[in-house]
Amino acid sequence: MGSGELFFLLKGLQWTIALSVVGFIGGIVVGLGVALARTCGVRAVERAMAGYIALFQGTPLLMQLFVVYYALALYGMKLDAWVAVAFAFTLHASAYLGEIWRGAIEAVPKGQVEAARALSLSYFWRMKDVVLPQALRISLPATIGFLVQLIKGTSLASFVGFTELARAGTMVSNQIFKPLLVFGVVGVMYFVICWPLSLYGTHLERRFAAATR
């Protein structure tokens, strides 16, 4: 495998990272709203958000990509492959992160929430100053673990024609007819990105567990 093929794989890696970042940041923004809606105390809103989470957690990511890219086109909403996969990954990430953070919010000791209410803090300030800082700390290991899964999940974007690392590897393999070599390099690239994140998530989990003893 020459420098040209390696450069093409690196370009695919660049798009994998870009898609992961966009999907994760979009998931953070939307997922925070989902988590807050799931814990707002309004039963109708909580049930609606529970249905939203169940929809995305109960269906394959590949199907979600197909729906966004192909099904919307049937109704005249033809999206570019990059826009479609970024939108699909944002929705997917928001459902998972929303549920992770919902659990973290509910894990904050009730006594602290009641104390904030006794101080006449509004819902906004209770969340901003009391609940969310602690929930963020609780949810950080699981959030990083989901990011690792999201990075690996970007390989499914190739099914709708988006050229990320896995698709770039397939294209190079078809050109030089050395699939073991090519996908060995692709695997190393995924490993270099995901392994440090996994170690960091494990480190945080152990650190927080030790702090609560």
Image (tube, rainbow, N blue to C red):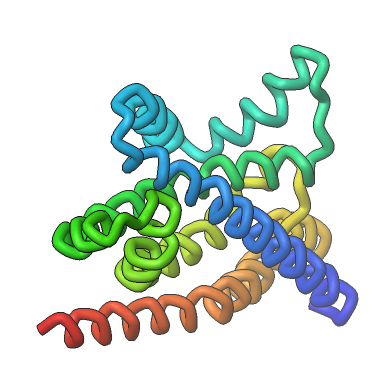
Q: Is 166 situated above or below 39?
A: below
Rendered location of residue 71, percent (x, y): 68, 20
Rendered location of residue 35, percent (x, y): 40, 46
Q: For residue 154, what is the image quadrant?
A: bottom right
Q: Is 160 situated above or below 117?
A: above
Rendered location of residue 40, percent (x, y): 35, 39
Q: Is 127 placed left or right of 207 in the picture?
A: right
Q: Is 104 situated above or below 58?
A: below
Q: Is 138 placed left or right of 196 in the picture?
A: left
Q: Is 213 placed left or right of 143 in the picture?
A: left
| Residue situated furthest right in the rendering | 4
Q: Is 68 situated above or below 164?
A: above
Disc count in the image?
Answer: 0
- Quarter of the picture containing the N terminus is bottom right
Q: Nearer the viewer, residue 44 or 2?
A: 44
Residue located at (72% from left, 63% from top): 18
Q: Nearer the viewer, residue 68 or 12?
A: 68
- Tell me, yes or no, if residue 16 can be seen here: yes
Residue located at (69% from left, 47% from top): 86
- Tell me, yes or no, if residue 59 can be seen here: no
Q: Nearer the viewer, residue 76 or 29?
A: 29
Residue located at (66% from left, 46% from top): 157
Residue located at (36% from left, 47% from top): 99
- Quarter of the picture containing the C terminus is bottom left
| Residue situated furthest top in the rendering | 75
Q: For residue 207, what is the image quadrant?
A: bottom left
